[in-house]
Amino acid sequence: MGSDVTGAVTVADGFWDTYSTYYDSVYRLMPYRKLLWDVFEALELKARMRILDAGCGTGNLEHFIAEKSHPTVEIDAVDFSPAMLARARAKCADLEYVRFAETDLDGRLPFEDATFDRIVSINVLYALKDQVASVRELLRVLKPGGKLVLASPKPEFRWRPLAAEHFRRIGNIWGASRKAKAVLSGAVTMSTTAAGSFVLNTLVINRRERRGDYHSMGQPELKAFFEQRRADGVGDFSIEPTMADQSLLATASKASAA
């Protein structure tokens, strides 16, 4: 699944700029909002924290956080797609505590060592050229004792479970009129913009995955990946399924300096 991503392609590729036209539609899908909620809880935000959103896409996480009761924080949100960033800036124009910047996660980040209390990256890891180097760079700018929250789609990612889970959750909505409105809205989303996202996933992202440009990880592989990052500063970590069991959420602390 493609989304809030800085990927293994150049800006000239243009794919993620095109994807930005469709990606906001997933915000209306309940499994995706559950993913954002899981990320929000894992971040454990506290007052005066500085957060890096590495691959912010269209600013869905920033918008989601703004809807919640949260302490005063600062967020640096970066992405390499100008079109994604344009949508993010428009969506979050009234959020003075968020700074957006064009940055390629495949290179050195423009931040000093140990800058951030929290780093979050949603649906990005699978599309990076050098996953090890990029995560090392994220750890470099994370403070000792800080936390990295990383969500990534599983290799067998499928859209059908998301649709099924979306309409199952609608069944829990109280009130016939509210439920009917949610069903209609979901049906429209699934048949229009979400359908465009599905097509791009099938025709572009899945093909790039098969030829080795992208690399998703299942739970055993992601666990091994984080175990191997112990030498880079990863301390305790956990990995849980999320988004209708189509993605994984990894939460890792950075070991405190000796």
Image (cartoon, rainbow, N blue to C red):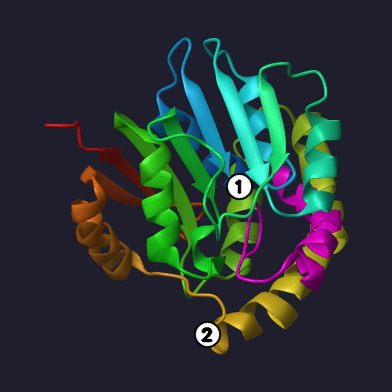
Image spot of residue 87 (x, y percent): 84, 42
Mark 1 against mark 2, which lies toward the viewer?
2
Regarding residue 248, the answer to whether it shows in the image is: no
User: Mark 1 falls on what kind of element?
Assistant: helix
Residue at the location (25% across, 56% down)?
A: 229
Left or right placement of residue 121 versus residue 253 in this view: right
Q: Residue at x 30, y 70 (%)?
A: 221
Residue 110: % across, % down: 57, 41
| Circle number at residue 32 | 1
Q: Nearer the viewer, residue 175 or 25?
A: 25
Residue at x 51%, y 28% (from the top left corner): 51
Name the residue type under label 2: Gly
Residue at the (57%, 63%) spot, across then down: 161
**Is 50 located above or below residue 218 in the figure?**
above
Of 56 and 99, nearer the camera is 99
Whole-angstrom CA distance, mark 1 to mark 2, is: 26 Å
Magenta-drawn segment: 1-27
Where is residue 33 drawn, in percent x and y?
61, 40
